Image (spheres, helix red, strand yellow):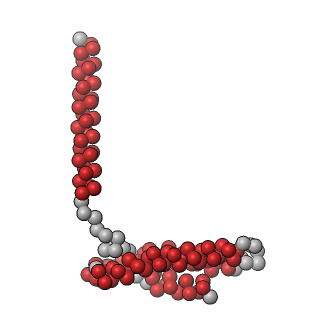
Amino acid sequence: MKRLSFFFKLSLFARRRIYTLKIFFNSCEDILNTPKPSIIKTFAPGWFAAVMGTAVISIAVFSFQAVLPFATALQMFFLFTALLFFVLAIVPWVLRWFLHFDDACRDINHPVSAAFFPTMPISLLVIGIALE
């Protein structure tokens, strides 16, 4: 009798786990099959803050050229990284204005999202200073 109750409990446990796994895999399948918005449609202009920060590091390293022997190489590394970030960010930013103009205008009228739109021109200014 004791064995029977053990196997009965084990079968109940297994059934619950199988049911849980079925629910999990069905939800994963639903997640995988749902259409996802494109990167261009949901691109946030705040990504240019990464460009600004990387270019500012390049400018800051310039002031340590007398102290650090490898400061020039470090400065060039951060400058080229900032340029790479800028190119990777400007492409979806420009495409968003052409392909999803309504979403871009909605972000400009949003009180929080609109504050990040100046990061693109500021990142251009900081890169220009770093290139000088």
Quarter location, residue 79: bottom right
The answer to whether residue 62 is seen in the rendering is: yes
The image position of residue 103, as x and y in percent, is 28, 78
The answer to whether residue 106 is seen in the rendering is: no
Q: Nearer the viewer, residue 47 or 100?
A: 100
Q: How many marks?
A: 0
Who's the residue at 38% across and 79% down the image? 93
Vertical side of 1 occupied by 44: above or below: below
Quadrant placement of the N terminus? top left
Who's the residue at 60% across and 83% down the image? 130
Vertical side of 75 occupied by 25: above or below: above
Who's the residue at 26% across and 39% down the image? 20
The image position of residue 91, as x and y in percent, is 41, 79
Quarter location, residue 24: top left
In the image, taking residue 75 as reference, residue 12 lies left or right, namely left
In the image, taking residue 98 as reference, residue 124 lies left or right, namely right
The image position of residue 44, as x and y in percent, is 38, 74
Quadrant placement of the C terminus? bottom right
Who's the residue at 56% across and 87% down the image? 128
The image position of residue 19, as x and y in percent, is 23, 37
